[in-house]
Amino acid sequence: GEDVEQSLFLSVREGDSSVINCTYTDSSSTYLYWYKQEPGAGLQLLTYIFSNMDMKQDQRLTVLLNKKDKHLSLRIADTQTGDSAIYFCAEKTDKLIFGTGTRLQVFP
Amino acid sequence: DTGVSQNPRHKITKRGQNVTFRCDPISEHNRLYWYRQTLGQGPEFLTYFQNEAQLEKSRLLSDRFSAERPKGSFSTLEIQRTEQGDSAMYLCASRPSGAEAFFGQGTRLTVV
């Protein structure tokens, strides 16, 4: 079946690293995604990783994929107040299946 | 091309009325998706099209909901006899044959 789970909240101090975790169930997922959603806004694609990769780095973002455990993480280095938002992971077979989102709060 | 465009951005309607939303995808994106998002939840899949063909419909899509993509470009989502439980953000996304899926800003529906 298709199910994506995330922890609901994460609070970090400005300048620290944030790690947002996600687990998924569908081993046939071809891509896994991270989206960011700010209040009242649509979904912004941050990054994605192909299922045969185990790591992808894009500036302050690092995605780690453990396909055996079906675990995906997003690390944000040097977290800024502008990073405060809800972060969704999603898996893709024919369609995107989203988790419930992790609300990241960054405090000074 | 300015990305995926959805209209209207906001819609307030009385219970029992019909509403229609429009999505204009990014040019040449052959896949188009509709999602619904309620407060505190992740987007829930409703349906998707490849070109003009509707390939899958979620069980969330009751018979009051219908989606079309007549020429394989823009799409419409119609809700008939709206109910208060239909209040949500309706999101549209498009992607080419590759990986990246891009979302519009959504249409927020409030049924009063």
Image (cartoon, grey):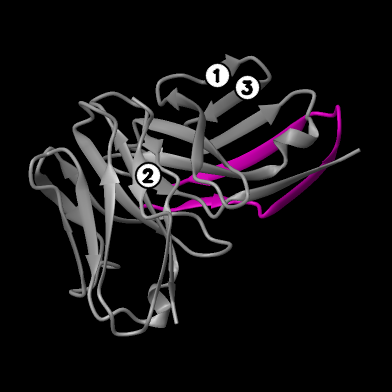
Report the disc number at residue A106. Answer: none
**In this view of the protein, can residue A69 be seen by the observer?**
no
Q: Residue at x 44, y 33 (%)?
A: A32
Of residues B40 and A99, the one drawn nearer to the viewer in this rendering: B40
Counting from the top left corner in percent of width and height, residue A101 is at 58, 50
Mark number displayed over residue A26: 2
Q: At numbered mark 3, what does the secondary structure look like: helix, strand or loop? A: strand
Q: Which quadrant of the structure image shows residue A76?
A: top right
What residue is at 40 percent from the left and 42 percent from the top? B104
Residue A11 shown left or right of residue A83 in the figure:
right
**Pointer 1: residues within 10 angstroms few (<14), some, or many (20+)?**
some
**Which chain is home to disc 1?**
A
* Residue placed under numbered mark 1 in the picture: A55
Mark 1 belongs to which amino acid? Met
- Magenta region includes residue A53: no
Q: Which residue is drawn at 37% across and 44% down?
A: A26
Indicate the secondary structure of the residue bearing disc 2: loop
Residue B19 shows in this picture: yes
User: Given this view, does label 3 or label 1 mark the residue nearer the observer?
Assistant: 3
Q: Main secondary structure of the magenta part?
A: strand
Measured in 3D between alpha carbons, the distance from the residue under mark 1 to the one under mark 2, in whole angstroms, is 19 Å
Q: Do the residues at discs 3 and 1 belong to one chain?
A: yes
Residue at mark 3: chain: A
> Mark 2 falls within which chain?
A
* Cβ atoms under marks 3 and 1 closer than 8 Å: yes
Q: Which percent across, then down, holds residue A1? A: 34, 54
- The answer to whether marks 1 and 2 mark residues whose Cβ atoms lie closer than 8 Å is no
| Residue at the farthest right position | A108
Q: Which amino acid does label 2 sit on?
A: Asp
Query: Which residue corresponds to mark 3?
Result: A62
